[in-house]
Image: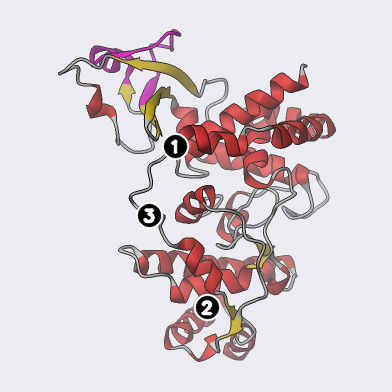
Amino acid sequence: MAAEPAQRAAKARKPTVEADDAGEFASFAQWREVSAFIDDMVARHGYSRAELEGTLSRVRFVDSAIQLMKPAPASKPKNWTAYRARFVEPVRINAGVSFWNEHADALQRAEEQFGVPAEIIVGILGVETVYGRNTGNFRVMDAITTLAFAYPDTPTRQARMDYFRGELANTLLFARDSGIDPFSLRGSYAGAVGWPQFMPGSIRRYAVDFDGDGKIDLRNSPVDAIGSIANFLVQHGWKRGEPTVFPAMLDQSSGSGWEMFLNQGLQAKFRLDEIRAAGVQTPAEPPSDMLFGLVDLQNGAAPTEYWLGANNFFAITQYNRSFFYAMSVIELGRAVRTARGI
């Protein structure tokens, strides 16, 4: 994925923390689980044990990464209006207009090559980093190693540590393949890097050299970021020329049946006729030959907002597994396009 799902959901609801080198040395290389990780890297990827022990001895334990990864209180209601206001706002819209004007050629080329509209790419870059302004200042090695071996106590702790151990391996491999010091990588508290906030594994799988300079650089090349986002979306199911969402209204009468379409995962899998038969109305006329999912944007004490999400909406949720995130990307991109006036 572009950035790891739990991290990205947490990132959406917590303030940005510009922390980083404030961690403490934890002698990670002496931990039993780290020793097993080193053995695996030696066996599978040809590292020397001494090299990896030396590298991991430089890692700092970052408690703030652990605190930021903890789930939000379950009692806190979701509020789409408040969430949207954080991202679809004048600073991002104005910065998006400037970015689009400066990189119009690259955005058009990405749309032609991958079929992803410029406004979607612009929306993602605006939500993620305000067009490269806020890319994170944690040392990626510190954040990922801490989460790989000291993830907070949650029901999915072991699965999350397994994930971050994979990302630690990807960090080391990416640095070796690129000829860079892994400690030069800075990013989010979960290790997401650069303009588009790709996790190291996503950099290795989906990033592209879109500016043609012979290297992939998501930290310094917005053009590489543009092409890489487009490639990521296509690899996760984006279909050229298809829509993203349609507004929906629900028949709230008893027994209408639309509730069965809620909480059905991040996939468009229902026919329009069966959704309508359950009491879902659409002011617009969606294509009858496409599949959809019912998107609920909860609004605290205010009424929930509903949409029909098509395949391309759910492709965006593979970047961040959140309906709020995907709608913010769509609406920010539309706002930038409108403000640009072209």
Real-space CA distance between mark 3 and mark 2, rounded to the nearest whole angstrom: 37 Å
Q: Distance between the residues labelled 2 and 1?
A: 44 Å
Give the residue pinned by disc 2: 41
Answer with the quarter of the image where residue 230 lies: top right
Q: Is residue 288 above or below residue 231?
A: above
Counting residues from the N terminus, which is met first, the one under dot 2 or under dot 1? 2
Residue 73, numbered label: 3
Crowding near pointer 2: few (<14 within 10 Å), some, many (20+)? some
* Any part of residue 237 in sight: no
Q: Position of residue 255 (x, y in %)?
A: 15, 18
Query: In the image, which residues are magenta?
Result: 271-293
Q: Distance between the residues labelled 3 and 1?
A: 14 Å
- Report which quarter residue 155 is drawn in: bottom left
Instruction: Answer whether labels 3 and 2 touch (C-beta < 8 Å).
Output: no
Question: Which numbered disc covers residue 218?
Answer: none
Say what secondary structure mark 2 lies in: helix
Q: What residue type is labelled 3?
A: Pro
Q: Position of residue 89 (x, y in %)?
A: 66, 33
Local crowd size for mark 3, using a 10 Å CA cut-off: few (<14), some (14–19), many (≥20): few
Frontmost of labels 2 and 1 is 1
Question: Would you say residue 122 is visible in this rendering?
Answer: yes
Residue indicated by mark 1 = 79
